[in-house]
Amino acid sequence: MALPLSPRIRATQTPPIPAVRGWAARYDGRAGPVLDLTQAVPGYPPHAELLAHLAEAAGSRAAAGYGPIDGDPALRAALASDMARFYGAPVATEDVAVTSGGNLAFTMAMTVLAGPGEAVMLPTPWYFNHRMALSALGIPCVPLACRAEDGFIPDPDRAATLMQGVRAIVLVTPNNPTGAVYPPEVIARFAELARAQGAWLVLDETYRDFLSAAQSPPHALFADPAWRDGVVHLYSFSKA
Ligand SMILES: Cc1ncc(COP(=O)(O)O)c(C=O)c1O
């Protein structure tokens, strides 16, 4: 008989994607074709040259060992310069650490930022993996309700009334699941609120590359060198 799991783990929801794919599999097509939006994965494979390069790199001797703890220096430098270009602000190689995916980066950030009894604020509806990570780590979540009438843009004034015990505010923009793109002034106000309350701002911009030229740069946080004392930025290669 399996040993019982802790109540914390038993209370952690499972990803909804298999259930939704189950509905799609049972759907009879009566109302038209199904568009699978459960995961932001392009319907076409990466460029053949990129795949060939990855295959070659995977077969190299270097790929068979441990790498530097913060990630491959060349990759960190390339990402830092790409971020500096995208945000129009200085981002250094030392600012970047590489993990095996954005979900691991979030879990690591939460492990570091929130201790026992300290809470993390998530606007609703949230990205299910963020909620799962907090639940599995035993970190209480303070939901910040976002309304359809507001285009699912979170309200910094409402957040300010809920900051008791909050060690980090998590924003996802462009948002999963709502698609809302938070205006730069809203992001700036959350950064101010977090700073004033001694909390971290964790900004997940996994969907950054979905923005149009007119929506870029999406915020000016990196223009203030003090961002390093209060902002954790998350990005993933899995969408781009
Ligand atoms: C907001 C958000 N952050 C992070 C991730 C996960 O990124 P990765 O695939 O790199 O773990 C996703 C994937 O769907 C996401 O929607």
Image (cartoon, rainbow, N blue to C red):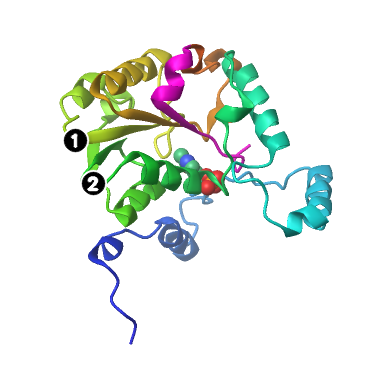
Label 2: element kind: loop
Q: Is residue 132 rendered to the left or right of residue 71?
A: left
Residue 199 pos. (x, y %): 29, 28
At horizontal 57% and vertical 17% (from top left) the residue drawn is 87
Q: Is residue 14 magenta?
A: no
Residue 149 pos. (x, y %): 27, 25
Label 1: element kind: loop
Q: Residues within 10 Å of mark 2 (few under 14, many from 20)?
A: some
Mark 2 near mark 1, Cβ–Cβ under 8 Å? yes
Q: Residues within 10 Å of mark 1 (few under 14, many from 20)?
A: some
Q: Quadrant of the N terminus?
A: bottom left
Residue 154 pos. (x, y %): 30, 26
Mark 1 is on which residue type?
A: Gly
Mark 2 is on which residue type?
A: Pro
Q: Earlier in the sequence, mark 2 or mark 1?
A: 2
Chain part drawn in magenta: 224-240
Identify residue for label 1: 165
Asked which quadrant contains residue 147, the reply is top left
Residue 110 pos. (x, y %): 37, 43
Asked which quadrant contains residue 47, the reply is top right
Q: Quadrant of the C terminus?
A: top right
At horizontal 19% and vertical 29% (from top left) the residue drawn is 163
Up/down of 211 relative to 129, above or below? above
CA–CA distance in space, label 2 to label 1? 10 Å
Is residue 178 something one can see in this rendering?
yes
Identify residue for label 2: 140
